[in-house]
Amino acid sequence: MRAAPPFLANTPPLALALAGVLLGCVMDAMVKQLGFTYGVILIATARYVFGTIFAGATVLALRARLPDAAGLRRHALRAVVITACSLLFFNCLTILPIAEATVLVFCAPLMISPLARWLLGEAMRPAATAALVVGFVGVLVTVQGAEGAADNARRVEGIVSGVGAAALYALSMVLLRQLSRKDDAVAVAFLSNLFPMIYLLPVAIVMGSAPMPGDLPLFALTGAAGFAMWFMLTSAYSRAQAQSIAAAEYTGLIWSAMLGYFFFAEIPRWQVWAGAAVVVAAVIMSAWDARQRKTRGLAD
C-alpha cells in the first residue's frame, strides 16, 4: 500500500474528520437542490458516476491495489446496501429539512451493535441496548412539532426513509469491518462508488432520465464531494482511534443547520436540537461503555 499523500499525512486526524463531515453536509445540500428538479434515481446515479471518475483517478495516482475476485464479490454485496442507503437518504433530503435528516442518520452508530450481533456473532452489551432505546426516544423528539405533520403523508415518508437509511448505513459499516482489514482504503472508496454506479446506471437509462447540460457541474461537484468526504473520513479513522474523533460527526448538525438556513430558508425547530442532544447522549453512552470495557480488558 502506498503512503498517504503528504497533505494527508501531515494533517491532524481530527481536522481531516471535520473536513470530511463538512464535505458530506455540502453534498447533502447539493442533493437537496437537485431534488427540486430531478428524481432520486438520477441524482444517485450521477453522484456515483462522477464519484467513480474521481475515485478511479485517485486509485491510479496512488497505485492502490484492488482486491482479488473473492474480495470484489464481497464489495459488490456491500454496495447493494450502500445503493439502497443512498436512495433512501436522498429521498429523505428531498422531503425533510437538512438538519432534521442529519439527526435521523445520527442514529446509525446505535444500530451497529445489534447488527454486529446478528451478522458477526458479537455480544450485545446491556449499555448498548439502553443506548439504542434512548436514541429511539431522541428520534421521536426530533420529528415532533412540524407544522401540519399529523396529516402529511409525504413527511412520514421522509422520516421512514431517514431511519431506513440510518439502519442500512449501520449495516454497511458492519460489513466494512470485514473488508477494511485487508483492502486499501482508497480501493474501498473506489469500489463503493463503482458498484453502485453499475447497479443504478441501467435503471436510469431505462427510465430515460438525463441531467440538463447546465446542471452537469453541480452533479460533478456532488460526486466529488461524496468521494472526498469518504476519503477524508477513511484517512482520519485509519490514523486515530475512533473514539478520539467520533465527536466530529456531530458537527454535521451545525453545518446542516447553516446550509439549510442560508440556501433553503430552513430554521430547525427546537425539537430538532433537543432530539439531537438525546441521540448524541445515547451514542456517547454506548462509546463510554465500550471504552470502559476495553480499559478493564473485558471481551465483548
Image (spheres, rainbow, N blue to C red):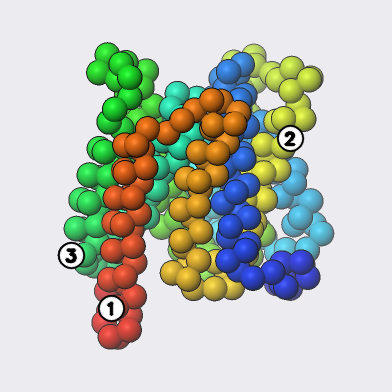
Q: Looking at numbered disc 1 in the image, what kind of residue is underneath it?
A: Arg
According to the image, label 2 marks what residue?
A: 220
Q: CA distance from mark 3 to mark 1?
A: 12 Å
Q: CA distance from mark 2 to mark 3?
A: 45 Å
Helix, strand, or loop for circle 1? helix
Give how far across and how far down residue 97 sits, in percent.
46, 29
Residue 203 in view: no
Q: Is residue 267 left or right of residue 189?
A: left
Helix, strand, or loop for circle 2? helix
In which quadrant of the rendered image does the N terminus lie?
Answer: bottom right
Give how far across and how far down residue 88 sits, in percent.
44, 32
Mark drawn on residue 126: 3
Where, by quadrant of the figure, is residue 153 drawn? top left
Mark 2 or mark 1: which comes first in sequence?
Answer: 2
Name which residue lies at 25% across and 18% down: 150
Q: Is residue 88 left or right of residue 164?
A: right
Q: State how many labels appear.
A: 3
